Image (cartoon, grey):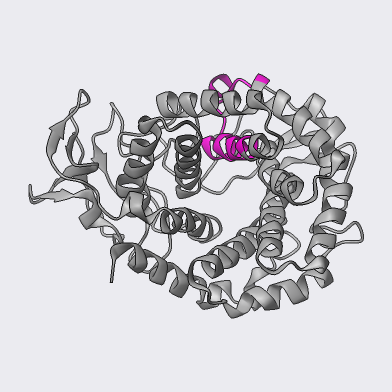
Amino acid sequence: MHYIDRHIEKSFQRLSEEEYQIQHLFRPAEYDWPGDWEGRALLAFSNLYAITGKKIPAMEQFVAELPDHLNPEGFLGEVFHEDAVNEQQLSGHGWLMCGLCEYYKLFKSEAILQIATKMFNNLFYRALPHYDHYPMSREARYEGEVSGTLAGSMSGWILSTDIGCAFICLDGVSRYYEITKDPKAEEFLRKTIVLFMQFDKIAAKAQTHATLTAARAIFRFYKTTGDAQYLTYVKDIFKLYVEEGMTYTYENFNWFDRKDTWTEPCAIVDSLIVSIWLYEETKDEAYKILARRIWFNGLSFCHRVHGGAGPNNCVCEIQPYLAVNMFEAPFCCTMRYNEGLLFVHTHREWFENPGEGITKDELGRTFNGDVLVVTDEETGKQYLLTELCFPEDNGKKYRVY
């Protein structure tokens, strides 16, 4: 079995286990990311179906039960509050919109499209005027954990430690616009994209996942409209990320300017997709090389022995070792990993051969082809990083430079 197929098989098995069966998919009322788990699950199920042609049973069960869980306004959690816009609710429903749209593309379900339309009108579009007041800087900030938490209110917004996650929903809305060409969705995207580009991601210590997810939305909007300014925006965002948000193992810092934290496979998936799209659009080989190195060195090591996905430590100039930080993030990364697998699967000719030939770069990293050569701290044995995918939570550390 090819190693790409091993990744796919392990993910399919993990998403078929009890944690992702229907009795666990809908989060309890007190869950503070309404729509997030549900949306990432439906997106993952749709991604895996697109790869394998096989349905995880919970997918159709979820679609059948979803209407019974929606509030009177057509989405999950509390109804919309004009004086307290919850950015985690917008972010979570961005993923639910992604899942609905990808399911619709596969199966052309009009019932699903109707749910998406009502959700857009009653949640996202109603939030649009409030983006004018989104806090672009924070005087005080709770540092945050792997799973973001609500961290107080400002300017009519309930804010998250996942700084900037209000812009994650652009991804879902861009997919909705791609399908419907709804003029209100176009209005939403044009306005929020301008505001996002004014957002100083470094100064705010924005979440890199939120930043890259918005970049993917902007690229999709560019492809749908043909408006070249949006391609320029994506190039600028990705350049900022590569220079300020990427670790020496082609993973991410969870927040800009916070190198002592951890990586996040969700953001690494985002970076893979953006680099693939930018190469396909520009034919600049640098993007293709980045895509390959993100997969071989970043995403592969994030995939755990049981098929889940989780964060690692940030390898950078102040920290030379790669190690598992958190074995699994089942609430986000295990599910989003499958969108990365879909892109690897559909671009197999890029990723089947890592290349060969030993080189060393200015950072002190050694490569064989596009794969990092790392050294086991305990034994001194050298490995290609691709040999270490599906790690266990065993405390192993590998020197990168």
Number of dots carrying numbers: 0
User: From where the camera sits, is residue 16 visible?
Assistant: yes
Decide whether residue 200 is among the magenta residues.
yes
Residue 69 vs 397, above or below: the answer is below
98 drawn magenta: no
Magenta stretch, main secondary structure class: helix
Q: Position of residue 279 (x, y in %)?
A: 44, 36
Residue ID at (45%, 49%): 265
**Image quadrant occupied by the N terminus:** bottom left
Looking at the image, residue 260 sits to the left or right of residue 93; the answer is left
| Rendered position, 28 above or below 293 | below
Q: Residue at x 36, y 32 (%)?
A: 285
Q: Is residue 387 above or below residue 287?
A: below
Give the x, y percent position of residue 23.
Answer: 65, 77
Residue extent of the magenta highlight: 198-219
When asked about the image quadrant of residue 391, the answer is bottom left
**Depth check: 277 or 42 in front?**
277
Which residue, as the protein is rendered here, is positioned at the far left?
Answer: 380
- Drawn side of residue 129 relative to residue 18, left or right: right
Q: Quadrant of residue 74?
A: bottom right
> In this view of the protein, can residue 139 be seen by the observer?
no
Q: Is residue 61 left or right of residue 111?
A: left
Which quarter shows the C terminus?
top left
What percent of the width, then of the height, locates residue 190? Answer: 76, 30
Q: Nearer the viewer, residue 363 or 117?
A: 117
